[in-house]
Image (spheres, rainbow, N blue to C red):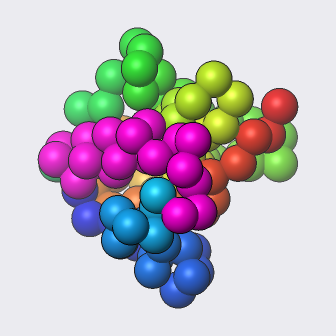
Amino acid sequence: MKIHYSSKKLEKILSDNRLIQRHYSKMYQGIVNRLTELNAVSNLSLITCNPPPRKHKLSGDHQGCWSVDISKNFRLIFCAFDTKLTDEVEITEIIIQDIIDYH
């Protein structure tokens, strides 16, 4: 899957393992695992809804986005690059929005 980022700063951090370690030290392995999984699949439907990634669709403030688990509380939030696509099989490009604890 092709990955885009919501900001240049986020792209710079998530494209460099050393910077991931510096900014997200406690969640480093989870972030690297999820990014590897997202890069390896051809479309969103191939990411499992079971743990550890536990992909799930969001509502409320993040309507139309998905997230995958990074740690117990933190999630990697992403949206489809083409917002008109709703079928997970058709989504081959995503935009990573943020890594946050939205609970």
Residue 65, percent from left and from top: 60, 48
Q: Nearer the viewer, residue 55 or 100?
A: 100
| Residue at 63% across, 23% down | 72
Is residue 83 visible from the viewing direction of this image? no
Is the C terminus in the top left, top right, bottom left or bottom right quadrant? top right
Residue 22, percent from left and from top: 53, 64
Is residue 56 visible from the viewing direction of this image? yes
Q: Nearer the viewer, residue 37 or 1?
A: 37
Taking the magenta stretch, the answer to whether it contains residue 10 is no
> What's the magenta bit mostly, secondary-structure-wise?
helix
Residue 32, percent from left and from top: 35, 48
Q: From the viewer's perspective, is residue 16 above or below residue 55?
A: below
| Residue at 46% across, 61% down | 20
| Residue at 31% across, 31% down | 47
Q: Nearer the viewer, residue 14 or 92?
A: 14
Taking the magenta stretch, the answer to whether it contains residue 30 is yes
Residue 62, percent from left and from top: 73, 48
| Residue at 23% across, 53% down | 39
Q: From the viewer's perspective, is residue 29 above or below residue 79?
A: above
Q: Which residues are the magenta region? A: 22-41
Relative horizontal placement of residue 99, taking residue 17 as reference (left or right): right
The answer to which quarter of the image holds residue 85 is bottom left
